[in-house]
Image: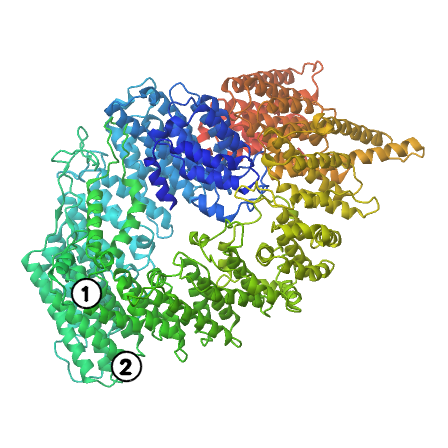
């Protein structure tokens, strides 16, 4: 549905965008309510950006959207929605001036990647579980991940000439490139890989669009990218490619290779030298073999770009041409890759082997022809192919000899001929490379290759490489069938015939059935069996494209097939089956010939083939189509002869055997049946859809016959052979044989499996073609990237409207498309037009497959069921004929287990389940069958039935319509009532069956009772009886039944007309128009008033709670929970409820995991429906329940109270003053620590706002809030104080700030004043509760005032935030001064009173600050800090300065808060204040504070890289340089780390000045040391600062080697003789440099002189103890 909406957005009319925004914008006023999440999802889903709606999008609207985006920080779901909206706007709204929005946009983009900063490798500190799963599934295409696609799309379309987006991108790349390195992988690698992939994808897409727009003369040309913009972008992305090309993440490494290939066509002078250099490095660096595979892949993907660049010189006519390698360098690189990678074909290294073959295939695809007719050399690369071929085939043959298969084919296991090695299973590169190579060889070189291949094939028997050798022979035959047949295949055929001629024969292939023979004594030697089966299997693969040339040896092949079927060996028989199948297919199928022949050479480049784009006009030479194999008369005649020999005669023999009723013990008959079935199977598999399909049943009109003959999709896989009568005859004989085998051969699984396979080929017309197309499509996807030239080709300047591919690839796609069309040609006839009756023979075979799908053997059941489902998908009208048999097998007692298992497999298929949902008879039959299957006692059967029931729940779409059987019948009540009666009868008899059946039955009963779109208008009495039944079930002894009864009763009562409004969580839209004349009140009240009913019900429900903290594995509640949450019975209940709570959870107190919202909704509905009767009946039990100590009873009491309080009826308001308020107070007062969260959930449920946006205030909200706000006596325990604040907190969370009433505002202002007065409470638990409550109160009041809320309290008018910040700063100073005085006094206690008072005052200050930190933690976790930014910034200095104190708890809280604050983005103007505060804190007298400030600065500068002004950045930079000379070594080292991070993504001029100045200072310091001059007051700290400046410069480029690095690191190494900590800094820096440059050191060391390398070696060597 979402993809449909995406496609339709472009057709939305003018004004649609404004309407959508007006509809959903009000829901985003309260960002802490879940309705804002849904609103953002709908905006992202529906908002159009087509031409007629672009006028709606303005700068003011973009500003509003960005404010909403940043208003909910650290929420990945929120980021995904807004990133998608912004991406669409940026792409289509070219008139918007985006420059002013770039800082905010790039800040959001950078921080969405969630990479660790400053060695912070801890987990992401914010919860991802507070977003409802239903919301995620509805509006997110996949799991919650960084929206890298939308980020990349936005960045690409923000680029424009003269814009600053490129500069922002370069900064972003500088910051992210280190995380692409193999040593820095992690959870962020996936999103970074996606980012790189889509950066290149959208850049290529934009270039193609701009080129087309230029041709069409479209406006806005000024925004098109020029050469300088293209080069800048490519150079930026190339940094990411360079880091990621050797990643341990295979997806990232592959994406880097593809990206470099695409960009090589955009900026060849930049990218191609990089690709060649990477290849040479990998080739020379034998210590890193993992690089070799990636480098080969990169060369393979860029091979065409290299060949084009080696011949084109126009692209090199630039000012930087002196830096560009010559074409000869590219030619040399290709020649080296062709020769030196031959060793890469290693059986012990499959990835490298496949990459090598991909490289060869890619290079071969570019060349028009291999070799010159005189010397065998190709003019493109200058390589001698004759010698290369010899070496290539030697390596290839060695590889094939040492291959080992992964599986073996055994009797009864009908596998493909594949030997299961990586060459075939892991990709198409092997066969594709061989076809291209042999197809493009010149005649002399082909003869050379043919001789070597023939010698190898005839000289080796390789059972482990059957498929691989067969594909080698197939490629050889395809290139030159005439010669390959003579030299390669005929000797193999003759060898098979001669070998089998002298061996024992069973005579099974003869036309007549011989007298019974003792075949058990006949056998082949193991060696002969292996040799013959190997050769036959190789032949079966090799002759796939033999065509008419096979007729030259048709008699020999026919004799070989006959001898194979006569051999007393299953392996040889099966090999004969494979050969016959391939032979028929080769004769009758359409397939291209000369696919790899070059018809168009690239103009101006000798030896290079021109590739083709299907979206441009071709000249006659380029558009020459392939030559197709069209079977001639001789081929057709030979194919029909093979059908006569192997199909007709086999059918006759099979019919004779079945009629003769041979003894089952006869071994000859068993062998004969195997051979007969193999012959039939091979004939049908080979002919495929060339054997005409069945016609519809006789008696159809001429018009119907014409409709049947009309093809919805035209296509054919080959010429027609045989006839429809032959297919009919085959069907009749096989139907007869099936009955015979099920009666006499039911214990032979081999025969039954063969029979199923034959039936599948017979009934599923076109399925073989579809399977071939599906397999080939997967192989094409893997290989397509290596044979693709993008539309924008700046190497040659010849651009296209679409990507170009080699001619052979387009032919291959055309061939596979024709195969797909053939598979679909008659597939849709019966599906689209139900008036066409299925052929009668199809019905016969359907019954056979149905019987086989219920067979005893699991493999037979599986394959028969799969074939049956496939057939039913084509013939949906036959499903109704299968249902009775399937439901009988499932629901009838005495039916064996295997039948039930088979029935479950077929019933849960989508096709059958869809019919059940549409047909009432099928639905009722299915329901009764599954409810009557309790007699199946095995675990396997019960598991299958449970899975079937789960699928039914997932597929359920409402009750099916009842077709009226009589003209005068007015409704389907009778059928529905009959089914209800039967289900209720079954329920009454379910005392001794599994409890799951009880649940299933009640589930079905509920579905019938609930109104749906097909409302049967059941009598009100029936619905009332069902409601009473579910009410009585609340006293059931089965916990799952009670849970189901509660949910069912809620759903029934929600449809009652007495309800004042219809709940938003209705599942079906038809529920709002139901039961207009009935009320449940009259029937439910008598039951409720029964003595003891309410008590028993409450007692039972109290046990139905799950307590996640139960650690005892034998805990009964935990065991019960596993039953309650069984997906197959109660998992569907969640779909009926709107998710609750409707606001976000960020603390454990808000979760209340044992609180069951469904129970609260039950009592809410009972009170609304049944009135005061329920309320009075609940009073006494509830008063007793709230004082119970058991957790389950406490939880239930909280749920009952929650539902009653939220019911919003007048008599509840009266009951509040009489007794309900007192009960709530008692419950809250007496609740235990274990149930505190559940009572908090009770209060939260009771005050939850109503309506979609939660703005409608419940009737009792104010009374509940007043109750909680009542002052406590001074004598109450402190836990009661904490509990009160906790309850107030969860209550205030549900208040919508945008719609707060005056009383709510006044109450919150009073509570704010109270909370501020309790900040220094003596108990930690209270302080935590106060801090959390304070964050909610303050944010609510702040947000309310932004909507015009009236503030009346003096404390709020006096700005509570300023008072809070002022006090925090003051107390922080006092805490520090107290700590310093304690240290000075040596921690000795003083005896005077003043000192005691000072300690007491200090403790109060510490407690006050702890509460403030709790406030900060809560605000940051909840996202409410976005409206409290000024407070957060004001508390920044106290937070940092108290990280390291003697008070452990205070420091721990400060660290937690700061860890969260590191992820917070602070907007302007508060950002400038933050910088000032941080610079001031870095000058603090305490060195711990300075270090803490510097640590935080690393994350702070990273997060705000794009928001900080140049002056602010420079101020931080200058401060860090100043701190390099700090007296404390820890401060100096941390300042150097900050500087190292600042250099990434900073202004190049600023970085260069710092680097040059630090180098000059180091030179001066070195000279002073050499001349032994007096230090002139230069302290050790100052000298250390100079060295640290050098170190920070070196570490700022961890993986690169700029030109200044050798001199800088050598200079640093000269300070190795200095005392510590200078020496330590030098050694650490050099060690880190060596670690980060280890992979490329073999190349990078060439940038150093010998003297420099010697200095580095001396400084890196370990010194002995005596040195």
Tag shown at residue 1353: none
Most foreground residue, 1358 or 63: 1358
Residue 1337 visible in rendering: yes
Position of residue 1427 in the picture relative to residue 513 (left or right): right
- First reached walking from the N terminus: tag 1 or tag 2: 1
In this orientation, which residue lies closer to the viewer: 424 or 844? 844
Q: Position of residue 1319 (x, y in %)?
A: 76, 36
Rendered location of residue 1558, percent (x, y)? 58, 19
SS type, badge 1: helix
Percent coordinates x, y for residue 359 in the rendering: 30, 42
Q: Give coordinates of residue 399: x percent, y percent.
A: 31, 53
Q: Is residue 816 above or below residue 1099?
A: above
- What residue is at 17 percent from the left and 78 percent from the top? 655
Q: Quadrant of residue 1621?
A: top right
Disc 2, SS: helix
Instruction: Locate the C terminus and report the quarter of the image it occupies.
Output: top right
* Mark linked to residue 684: 1
Q: Quadrant of residue 1375?
A: top right
Left or right: 1225 in relation to 919 = right
The residue that appears at 26% across and 78% down in the rendered structure is 741
Q: Which residue is mark 2?
A: 743
- Along the horizontal axis of the image, is 1105 left or right of 1130? right
């Amino acid at each position: 549905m979402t993809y449909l909406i995406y496609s339709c957005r472009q057709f939305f009319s003018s004004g649609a965008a404004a309407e959508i925004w007006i509809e959903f914008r009000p829901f985003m006023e309260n960002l802490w309510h879940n309705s804002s999440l849904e609103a953002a999802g709908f905006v992202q889903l529906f908002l159009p950006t087509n031409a007629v709606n672009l006028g709606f999008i303005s700068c003011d609207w973009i500003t509003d959207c960005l404010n909403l985006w940043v208003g909910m920080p650290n929420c990945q779901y929120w980021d995904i929605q807004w990133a998608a909206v912004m991406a669409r706007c940026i792409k289509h709204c070219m008139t918007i001036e985006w420059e002013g929005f770039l800082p905010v946009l790039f800040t959001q983009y950078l921080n969405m990647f969630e990479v660790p900063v400053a060695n912070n490798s801890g987990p992401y500190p914010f919860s991802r579980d507070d977003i409802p799963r239903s919301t995620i599934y509805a509006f997110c295409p996949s799991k919650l991940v960084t929206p890298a696609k939308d980020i990349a799309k936005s960045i690409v379309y923000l680029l424009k000439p003269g814009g600053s987006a490129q500069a922002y991108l370069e900064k972003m790349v500088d910051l992210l490139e280190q995380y692409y390195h193999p040593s820095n992988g992690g959870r962020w690698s996936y999103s970074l890989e996606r980012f790189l992939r889509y950066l290149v994808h959208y850049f290529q897409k934009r270039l193609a669009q701009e080129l087309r727009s230029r041709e069409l003369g479209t406006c806005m040309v000024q925004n098109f990218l020029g050469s300088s913009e293209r080069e800048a972008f490519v150079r930026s992305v190339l940094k990411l490619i360079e880091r990621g090309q050797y990643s341990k993440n295979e997806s990232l490494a592959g994406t880097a290779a593809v990206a470099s290939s695409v960009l090589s066509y955009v900026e060849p002078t930049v990218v191609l030298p990089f690709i060649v250099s990477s290849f040479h490095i990998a080739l020379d660096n034998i210590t890193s073999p993992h690089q070799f595979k990636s480098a080969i892949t990169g060369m393979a993907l860029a091979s065409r770009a290299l060949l084009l660049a080696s011949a084109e010189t126009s692209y090199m006519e630039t000012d930087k041409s002196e830096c560009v390698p010559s074409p000869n360098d590219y030619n040399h690189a290709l020649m080296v890759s062709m020769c030196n990678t031959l060793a890469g074909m290693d059986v012990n290294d499959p990835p490298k082997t496949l990459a090598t073959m991909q490289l060869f295939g890619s290079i071969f695809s570019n060349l028009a022809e291999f070799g010159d007719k005189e010397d065998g050399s190709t003019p493109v690369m200058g390589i001698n192919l004759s010698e290369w071929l010899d070496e290539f085939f030697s390596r290839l043959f060695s590889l094939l000899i040492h291959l080992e298969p992964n599986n073996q084919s055994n009797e009864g296991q009908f596998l493909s001929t594949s030997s299961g090695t990586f060459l075939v299973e892991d990709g198409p590169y092997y066969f594709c490379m061989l076809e291209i190579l042999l197809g493009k060889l010149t005649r002399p070189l082909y003869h050379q290759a043919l001789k070597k291949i023939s010698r190898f094939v005839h000289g080796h028997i390789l059972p482990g490489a059957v498929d691989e050798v067969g594909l080698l022979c197939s490629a050889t035959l395809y290139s030159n069938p005439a010669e390959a047949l003579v030299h390669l295949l005929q000797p193999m055929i003759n060898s098979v015939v001669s070998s089998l001629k002298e061996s024992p024969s069973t005579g099974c292939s003869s036309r007549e059935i011989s007298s019974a023979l003792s075949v058990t004594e006949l056998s082949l030697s193991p060696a002969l069996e292996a040799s013959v089966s190997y050769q036959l299997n190789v032949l079966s693969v090799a002759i796939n494209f033999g065509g008419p040339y096979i007729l030259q040896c048709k008699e020999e092949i026919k004799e070989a097939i006959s001898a194979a079927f006569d051999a007393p060996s299953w392996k040889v028989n099966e090999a004969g089956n494979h050969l016959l199948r391939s032979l028929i297919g080769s004769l009758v199928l359409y397939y291209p010939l000369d696919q790899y022949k070059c018809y168009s050479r690239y103009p101006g480049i000798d030896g290079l083939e021109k590739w083709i784009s299907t979206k441009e006009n071709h000249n006659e030479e380029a558009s020459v189509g392939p030559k197709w194999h069209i079977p001639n008369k001789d081929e057709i005649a030979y194919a029909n002869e093979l059908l006569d020999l192997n199909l007709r005669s086999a059918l006759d023999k099979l019919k004779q055997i079945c009629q003769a009723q041979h003894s089952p013990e006869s071994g000859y008959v068993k062998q004969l049946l195997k051979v007969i079935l193999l012959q039939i199977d091979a004939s049908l598999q080979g002919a495929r859809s060339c054997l005409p399909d069945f016609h519809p049943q006789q008696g159809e009109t001429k018009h119907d016959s014409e409709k049947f003959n009309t093809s919805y999709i035209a296509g054919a896989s080959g010429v027609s052979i045989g006839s429809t009568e032959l297919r009919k005859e085959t069907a009749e004989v096989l139907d007869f044989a099936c009955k015979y085998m099920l009666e006499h051969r039911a214990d032979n699984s081999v025969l039954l499996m063969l029979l199923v396979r034959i039936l599948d080929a017979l009934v599923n017309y076109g399925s073989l073609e579809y399977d071939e197309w599906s397999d080939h499509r997967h192989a094409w996807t893997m290989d397509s990237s290596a044979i693709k030239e993008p539309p924008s080709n700046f190497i040659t300047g010849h651009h296209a409207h679409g990507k170009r591919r080699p001619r052979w690839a387009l032919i291959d796609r055309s061939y596979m498309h024709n195969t797909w069309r053939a598979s679909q040609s008659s597939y849709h006839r019966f599906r689209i037009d139900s008036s066409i009756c299925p052929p009668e023979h199809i019905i016969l075979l359907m019954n056979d497959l149905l019987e086989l799908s219920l067979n005893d053997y699991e493999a037979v059941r599986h394959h028969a069921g799969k074939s049956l489902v496939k057939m039913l998908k084509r013939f949906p009208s036959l499903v109704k004929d299968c249902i009775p048999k399937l439901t009988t097998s499932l629901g009838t007692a005495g039916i064996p287990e295997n039948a039930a298992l088979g029935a479950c497999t077929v019933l849960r298929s989508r096709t059958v389940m869809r019919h059940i949902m549409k047909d009432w008879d099928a639905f009722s039959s299915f329901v009764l069958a599954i409810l009557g299957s309790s007699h199946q006692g095995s675990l396997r059967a019960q598991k299958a039935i449970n899975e079937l029931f789960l699928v039914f729940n997932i597929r359920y779409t409402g009750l099916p319509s009842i077709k009226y059987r009589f003209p005068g019948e007015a409704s389907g009540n009778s059928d529905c009532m009959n089914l209800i009666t039967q289900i209720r009868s079954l329920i009454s008899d379910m005392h001794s069956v599994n409890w799951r059946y009880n649940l299933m039955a009640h589930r079905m009963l509920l579905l019938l009772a609930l109104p749906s779109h097909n409302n049967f208008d059941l009598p009100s009495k029936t619905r009332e009886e069902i409601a009473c039944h579910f009410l009585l079930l609340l006293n059931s002894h089965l916990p799952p039944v009670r849970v189901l009864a509660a949910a069912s009763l809620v759903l029934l009562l929600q449809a009652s007309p007495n309800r004042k409004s219809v709940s938003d969580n209705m599942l079906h839209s038809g529920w709002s128009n139901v039961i207009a004349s009935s009320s449940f009140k009259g029937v439910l009240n008598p039951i409720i008033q029964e003595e003891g009913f309410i008590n028993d019900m409450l007692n039972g429900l109290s046990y139905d709670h799950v307590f996640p903290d139960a650690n005892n594995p034998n805990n009964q509640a935990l065991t019960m929970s596993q039953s309650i949450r069984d997906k197959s019975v109660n998992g569907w209940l969640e779909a009926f409820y709107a998710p609750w709570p409707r606001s976000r959870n960020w603390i454990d107190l808000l979760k209340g995991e044992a609180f069951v919202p469904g129970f609260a909704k039950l009592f809410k509905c009972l009170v609304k429906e049944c009135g005061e009767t329920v309320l009075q009946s609940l009073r006494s039990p509830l008063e007793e329940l709230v004082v119970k100590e058991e957790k389950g009873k406490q939880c239930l009491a909280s749920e009952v109270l929650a539902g009653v309080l939220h019911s919003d009826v007048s008599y509840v308001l009266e009951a509040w003053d009489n007794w309900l308020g007192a009960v709530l107070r008692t419950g809250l007062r007496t609740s235990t620590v274990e149930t505190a969260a559940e009572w908090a959930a009770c209060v939260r449920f009771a005050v939850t706002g109503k309506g979609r946006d939660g703005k409608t205030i419940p009737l009792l909200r104010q009374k509940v809030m007043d109750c909680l706000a009542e002052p406590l006596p001074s004598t109450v325990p402190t836990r009661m104080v904490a509990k009160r604040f906790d309850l107030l907190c969860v209550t205030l969370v549900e208040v919508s700030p945008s719609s707060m009433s005056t009383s709510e505002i006044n109450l919150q202002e009073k509570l704010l004043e109270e909370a501020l007065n309790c900040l220094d409470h003596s108990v930690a638990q209270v302080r935590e509760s106060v801090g959390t409550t304070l964050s909610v109160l303050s944010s609510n009041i702040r947000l309310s005032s932004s909507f015009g809320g009236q503030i009346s309290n003096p404390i709020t008018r006096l700005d509570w935030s300023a008072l809070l910040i002022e006090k925090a700063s003051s107390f922080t100073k006092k805490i520090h001064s107290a700590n310093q005085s304690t240290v000075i006094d040596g921690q000795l206690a003083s005896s005077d009173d003043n000192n005691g008072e000072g300690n007491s005052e200090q403790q109060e200050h510490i407690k006050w600050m702890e509460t403030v930190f709790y406030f900060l933690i809560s605000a940051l976790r909840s996202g409410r800090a976005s409206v409290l930014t000024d407070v957060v910034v004001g508390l920044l200095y106290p937070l940092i300065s108290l990280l390291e104190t003697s008070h452990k708890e205070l420091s721990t809280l400060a660290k937690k808060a700061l860890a969260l604050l590191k992820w917070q983005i602070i907007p302007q103007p508060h950002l400038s204040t933050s910088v000032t505060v941080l610079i001031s804190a870095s000058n603090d007298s305490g060195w711990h504070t300075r270090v803490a400030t510097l640590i935080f600065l690393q994350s702070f500068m990273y997060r705000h890289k794009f928001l900080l002004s140049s002056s602010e950045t420079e101020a931080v930079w200058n401060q860090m340089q100043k701190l390099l000379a700090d007296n404390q070594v820890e401060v100096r080292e941390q300042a150097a780390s900050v500087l190292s991070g600042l250099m990434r993504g900073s202004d190049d001029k600023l970085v260069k000045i710092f680097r040059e100045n630090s180098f000059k200072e180091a030179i001066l310091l070195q000279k002073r040391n050499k001349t032994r001059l007096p230090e002139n007051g230069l302290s050790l700290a100052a000298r250390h600062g100079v060295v640290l400046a050098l170190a920070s410069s070196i570490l700022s480029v961890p993986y690169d080697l700029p030109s200044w690095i050798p001199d800088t690191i050598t200079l640093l190494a000269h300070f190795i003789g200095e005392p510590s900590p200078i020496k330590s800094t030098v050694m650490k820096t050099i060690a880190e440099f060596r670690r980060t440059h280890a992979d490329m050191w073999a190349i990078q060391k060439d940038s150093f002189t010998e003297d420099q390398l010697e200095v580095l070696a001396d400084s890196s060597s370990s010194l002995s103890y005596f040195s």
